[in-house]
Amino acid sequence: MTGLLILLAAALAGIGCYNLSCACVDVPTAQTSRMMMRARKQTGTSNEKLFDVYLTKIAGKLAPLLRLDPIKRGQLALTLSIAGIPLTPECYTMKAFLTAFATGLLGIPLFMAMPLMGLLVMGLAVTLWFSTYYKAFDLVKKRRKLIEAELPRFAASIQQGLATDRDVLKLLASYRRIAGPHLGQELDTTVADMRTGNYESALLRFQNRVGSTMLSDIVRGLVGTLRGDDQQMYFRMLVFDMRQIEQSNLKKEAGRRPKQMQKYSMMMLFCILLIYVVVLSVEVVGSLGAFF
């Protein structure tokens, strides 16, 4: 009974602290927030949850209290920009801290009633910190893989285009019409950057945004073309190497499929054996009844 009262008191104290913190940082009421989220969802501009909106608002107010290393801050800012997350590095880091902290607070009263459950909640808080903080890095890594899967076709298009024209801007703009969504977005940025500035600098920024070694090879060939070199043989060899890498990746992916299906095959085998065992057991029990 005492443990239940402690949990109830902790829950009420948490609700009071939550309402007090929302009032301090000027967070809108729940009804106003729901109406705003409904309007944004109808226009297709956002699919955030209400809790994330509150958490981002509080993190934005507390972000000035956080001091990040300049190098790590620059890397995180670049990652957030590539992932399309409109938050500052301080706000993003504070949001991860608040997510883990809010979960960890729930584990404090549990230590008094159920210590094992409290440890589980603390472990969940640590897991939430890593999953929230590294979410942007995972998005960038997944995006890079999707772009790299398209690079062999991109290099082949450049190779064919160099046979008739060495205008790098025209080559990128022509491939943009058939590019995938992620590479197409990068090409839009690069083409606009090239039209308003230096071609070589725009290509190098394109390379740094994606962070792929395969794209670095393509950019190296395009920079050589800008400097007047004949890069047709270079791109011919590059396309050959990329296709070899693509075939190797496909073979690895095909090799993983049987391993993924192996556990389901074992389950099916176990079910078939269980059917035979049940049938044999019923027959044996029925035969024993005839002897007695």
Image (cartoon, helix red, strand yellow):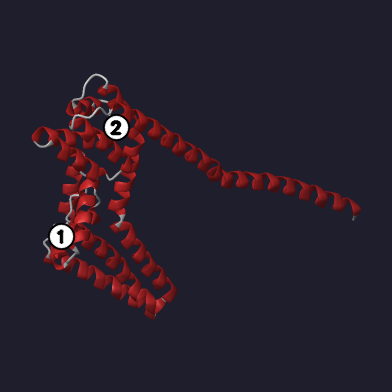
Q: Residue 89 falls in which quadrant of the image? A: bottom left
| Count of residue discs | 2
| Residue nearest the viewer, comparing 126 with 16 | 126
Residue found at x 24% / y 68%: 15
Task: Tell whether label 1 touches label 2 (CB within 8 Å).
Answer: no
| Residue nearest the viewer, comparing 17 with 215 | 215
Residue found at x 34% / y 38%: 148
Q: Is residue 211 above or below residue 180?
A: below
Q: Residue 165 falls in which quadrant of the image? A: top left
Q: Nearer the viewer, mark 2 or mark 1?
A: 2
Q: Secondary structure at mark 2?
A: loop
| Amino acid, disc 1 | Gly
Q: Is residue 84 visible?
A: no
Q: For this view, does 281 lie left or right of residue 50? A: right
Location of the C terminus (image quadrant): bottom right
Which residue is outermost to the right?
291
To which residue does mark 2 refer?
A: 180
| Residue nearest the viewer, comparing 236 with 70 | 236
Q: Is residue 206 visible?
A: yes
Location of the N terminus (image quadrant): bottom left
Q: Secondary structure at mark 1?
A: helix
* Whole-percent x, y for residue 113 in the image: 40, 77
To which residue does mark 1 refer?
A: 60
Which of pointers 2 and 1 lies earlier in the amino acid sequence?
1
* Whole-percent x, y for residue 129 in the image: 31, 62
Q: For this view, does 192 lie left or right of residue 9? A: left
Q: Is residue 42 above or below residue 174?
A: below
| Amino acid, disc 2 | Gly
* Whole-percent x, y for residue 53 in the image: 20, 54
Which residue is outermost to the left?
196
